Image (spheres, rainbow, N blue to C red):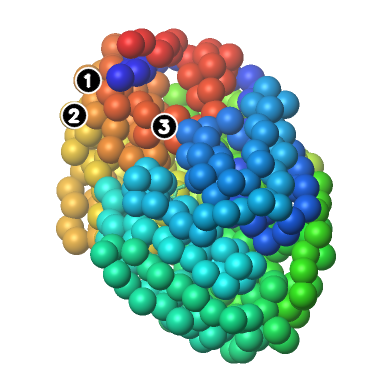
Amino acid sequence: MDKIKIRGGNSLSGVVEVSGSKNAALPILFSSVLTDELCVYKRVPDLQDIHSTLVLLKYLNIDCEFKSEQHEAQLKANCVNKHEAPYDLVRKMRASVVVLGPLLAKYGKAKVSLPGGCAIGARPINYHLSGLEKLGAKIQLENGYVIASCKRLRGTRVCLEFPSVGATENIMMAATLAKGETVIENTAREPEISDLACALRAMGAQIEGDGTERIFVQGQTSLHGCQYQIMGDRIEAGTYLAAALATKGCIEVTGINTKHLEAVLKKLEKTGAQIERKENAVLLRSPKKLKSVNIVTSPFPGFPTDMQAQFMVIMAIANGISHIKETIFENRFMHVPELIRLGANIIIDGNMAIIHGVKNLIGAPLMATDLRASASLIIGALCAEGESIVNRIYHLDRGYEKMEIKLRALGADIERIL
Ligand code: EPZ
């Protein structure tokens, strides 16, 4: 199993370009199920989760070609002969559940394994299922599978109990082929939702209101093929900015819409960092001393839960005490015991982490537990004195493209070892 070895202490400097967004690319690739025609996607990141998605799409008998060097995926779903997402595939990547809406809308049937919990929380899919039921799907749970069927879905009003990203995506995709208008209320406003809506519009879907709390979808009888470029990864961008700040560096991150990062940029500024917002880029200059800042994670436009672990490393070496409250997932502090192994002073009280900043961290062997926890350990190791080895790095490969290569180009002493 691959590991990453880091000798900490180098300040990051230079320019890094982010890859296409993982969390936008996954549902967009699944949306290709909605048409028989060719869909060509550009800026698809070369990540383990993308490969897992392609395995599932191939299993459905979709013609998939991924040119990883060019970051281009070509998908043609004109010969789908299975309507099932089996346990072994969903278990590896729970985002596979968003294949449910497209399969149901296009073929009137779908059998998708319930994903089960994961390292960061129980993560049920009840909002996905009740939304699809409101659109007219019959849903049963049997042997760990969701078995769904319908004639043609019917447009209706769906009000989500919570602005779930995945439920908004599943219901919005299903509604594109429903009869009549669907109004989805209390929707997630994450930029990835708008990116999916743009990709669906490129296929002929009629969607309005994405990016707000109410999305309107006028169902079509069919959708057509498209060419679409995925947006830049705001969480990858935030991760490199956090790494630069933790190492007292100065970097420019390119290839992102800075508006997608506003909540993170504001908090970085509160630590004392100088932030310059450019067109599709952010320049960060570190202060001499880091100030402590409190964070509460919340749905977009709030501070993203996917940046909580990385931000905690900055707080671990800031002056003073900070509080980080995690409100989205019930178990997203798995990185804390590992950061403590680097010498951080962090106490957990329910969904709150109380961080007493220390002067410096000291290298140690570490164990990654999930994607963003892995990123936080990499940042911790980059700013710690001495050597750290981060184990179970396959979590990182699910969501960061060539991270060690990008960090090395910024001056980090980092290598992948077997
Ligand atoms: C998406 O997960 C992202 N994943 C996550 O990214 C991200 O952390 C999360 O949104 C929040 O921003 C992808 O886009 C592939 P939710 P998702 O449905 O859709 C509860 C990363 O590191 N809930 O908005 O699964 C749920 O348990 C990751 O890249 C229900 O109770 O998130 C959670 O507590 C991990 N019932 C909260 O809502 C439901 O039916 C938010 O979940 C659905 C969700």
> Which residue in the structure is indicated by mark 1?
365
How packed is label 3: few (under 14 Cα within 10 Å), some, or many (20 or more)? many
Residue 373 in view: yes
User: Mark 2: is the Cβ under 8 angstroms from ligand 1?
Assistant: no
Of badges 1 and 2, the one in the foreground is: 1
Ligand number 1: quarter of image: bottom left
Secondary structure category for the residue under label 1: strand
**Is mark 1 in CB contact (under 8 Å) with mark 2?**
yes
Side (left or right) of 388 relative to 252: left
**412 relative to 148, above or below:** above
Q: Callout 1, which amino acid?
A: Pro
Residue toward you, 154 or 193: 154
- Residue neighbourhood size for the residue with mark 1, other residues' Cα within 10 Å, grouped as few (<14), some (14–19), many (≥20): some
In this view, 155 is above or below 417: below
Q: Nearer the viewer, residue 59 or 167?
A: 59
Q: Earlier in the sequence, mark 1 or mark 3?
A: 1
Residue 104, position in %: x, y? 56, 69
Q: Helix, strand, or loop for circle 2?
A: helix
The residue that appears at 26% across and 64% down in the rendered structure is 143
The three-letter amino acid code for the residue at tag 2 is Arg
Which of discs 2 and 3 lies nearer the camera? The answer is 3
Q: Which residue is mark 3?
A: 396
| Upstream in sequence: badge 1 or badge 2 | 2
